[in-house]
Amino acid sequence: MAFPFIAAALSFAEFAPTLIKWLSGNKNADHIASEIINIAKNITQCTTPEEALQRMRDNRALADDFQLAVYKSQTEWEIALLEDRQLARERDLEFLKAGHANRRADLMVVSAALGLILCLLSLAFYSDVLPGEAVGIISTIAGIFGGCLKDAFAFEFGSSRGSRVKDSTVAAMLERVG
C-alpha cells in the first residue's frame, strides 16, 4: 500500500515544493517517495519520517541540506523520465519501420478526444439542469481528458525548445558533477 508512504513523503514538500510534481501522477511515485523519506531520515539521523520532519522544522541547516539532496535527486528522476520517453519513442519508430501502426496509441488519443468532446457537449447542453456538483465533476473529467491529449501531443511532437534547453542544462550539470 503506497498511499501512506506517498503522503509521508508529501509532508516534506514544505521544504522542497517541487516534490509535489514528482509524487502526483508519476508512475514511479512510490519509489520516489521512498527515496525522499530515506533522504530525510539520513540527513536528520532519525528513524521515522515524522521525527525527520520535526527535526528539519527545528533546524534550518538540516532543511537546507534536505533541499540540496532533493534537488540532486530530482536531476536523476528527470533523466530517468527523459530516458523512459525516449525508449517509448524508439519503440514507436520500430513499429512504424515494421509497417505496423501503433493502434494502441491511436485508440488512446481517439478515446481521450471523444471523452473530452462528450464532457464539453454535456456541459454545453445540460449545465443548466445539472446540479453544481455534477458540473464540477464533469469539468474535472474534461480537464483530465485534456491533460491526456496534452501529454499525447507532447510525446508525439517532442520537446519544446525550452525543454530542450533545460535538457542540455541538466546534462551539462551532470557532466560537472560526475
Image: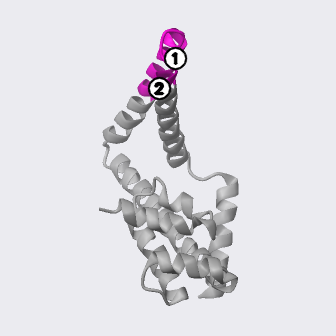
Taking 164 as reference, is 139 left or right?
left
**Circle 1: is it few (<14), some (14-19), or many (20+) Cα within 10 Å?**
some
Give whichever of discs 2 and 1 has the lower sequence position: 1
Horizontal and vertical percent position of residue 126: 49, 10
Residue bearing the label numbered 1 = 123
Q: Position of residue 165 (x, y in %)?
A: 69, 63
Q: Quadrant of residue 15?
A: bottom right
Q: Name the chief secondary structure element in magenta.
A: helix
Tag 2 near tag 1, CB within 8 Å? yes
Q: Is residue 53 above or below residue 5?
A: below
Q: Which element carries disc 2, helix, strand or loop?
A: helix
Q: Amino acid at mark 1?
A: Leu
**Which residues lie in the magenta part?**
113-135
Residue at the spot x=39%, y=50% of the render?
92
Magenta-colored stretch includes residue 61: no
Residue nearest the observer in this picture, 118 or 163: 118
Task: Please give the label number shown on residue 150.
Answer: none
Q: Is residue 51 above or below residue 116?
A: below
Q: Establish if 154 lies above or below 143.
A: below
Magenta run includes residue 119: yes
